[in-house]
Image: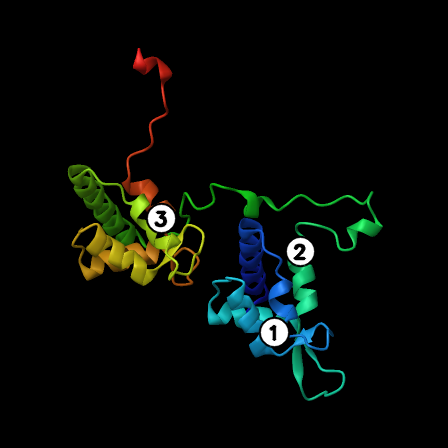
Amino acid sequence: MTTGNADQAILKCKTVVFKNRIRIRDFFRGFDKLRCGFITPSKFCSGLSMAGMNLSPAEIGGIVEKFTEACRNVPSMSLVNYQAFCDHIDESFTVKNLEKYPMQQVNDVPLDIMNATRYQTCSKRLTDEEEEELHHVLTRIAQVCKIKRILVKPVFDDAAANKNSTLSVNRVTANQFKQALNVKLGLRLTTSEVQVLLRKFDDNNDGMVNYVSFANLVDPPEQAFDPYSLR
């Protein structure tokens, strides 16, 4: 896994920490009985899972590789420096030991984490043929939903918030996406149509679908409230 991909996975972790306001360190400390700052790769992966990090195996492997060090007492054993990982995550939001240096300037939270509109568009580009097919599929879905007087986004919001889901922000799994389209919305899409939607809106190539971007292209735009219309 390239350093760039590992850094992208770490950015996803920072986003989860920021959105959910969690203390990432707390999910690893229980595995560190000796309070040495190091745990096994399997325990580190368990901590990531408990923290709600929805990462692919490749992304997890990249993070593990980035923070793995040889054990001082047993050179043949490699352990993950989870303290360094947590410091790396937290540095976007605060300064370590800030209470000792109250006048030190704290960096702003990165804009790509704070940007509330980052899910509303999909920059992933398909081939010209796929984009043309996608256009026809989206047009048909929009027409069907208009006739049925239904919005797709609330259906996906419910799926994303389900306690049995991954609870990812503005994303659902491919299976949830297909189920919502064909079962809950009753759109009766073909396999080919579903696949082109998945290729487009799985914009991180991690098996998770950016349903907000999809909904923005299907649902009618929200109308701004005009108080004078009530007169």
32 displayed left or right of 113? right
Residue 210, given in percent of the width and then of the height, sits at 38, 52
Amino acid type indicated by mark 2: Asp
Crowdedness of circle 1 by 10 Å Cα count: few (<14), some, many (20+)? some
Quarter-of-image position of residue 224? top left
Quadrant occupied by the N terminus: bottom right
Quarter-of-image position of residue 75? bottom right
For label 1, the residue is: 65
Crowdedness of circle 2 by 10 Å Cα count: few (<14), some, many (20+)? some
CB under 8 Å between discs 1 and 2: no
Q: Residue at x 16, y 54 (%)?
A: 188
Is there any visible trace of residue 142 in the rendered image?
yes
Q: Earlier in the sequence, mark 1 or mark 3?
A: 1
Quadrant occupied by the C terminus: top left
Q: Earlier in the sequence, mark 1 or mark 2?
A: 1
Q: Is residue 109 above or below residue 47?
A: above
108 displayed left or right of 43? right
Q: Which mark is residue 186?
A: none
Residue 74, given in percent of the width and then of the height, sits at 72, 88
Q: Is residue 26 above or below residue 34?
A: above
Amino acid type indicated by mark 3: Asp
For label 2, the residue is: 90
Tag 2 secondary structure = helix
Q: Earlier in the sequence, mark 3 or mark 2?
A: 2
Residue 220, given in percent of the width and then of the height, sits at 28, 35
Tag 1 secondary structure = helix
Q: Residue at x 29, y 50 (%)?
A: 131
How many discs appear?
Answer: 3
Front-most of 89 and 35?
Answer: 35
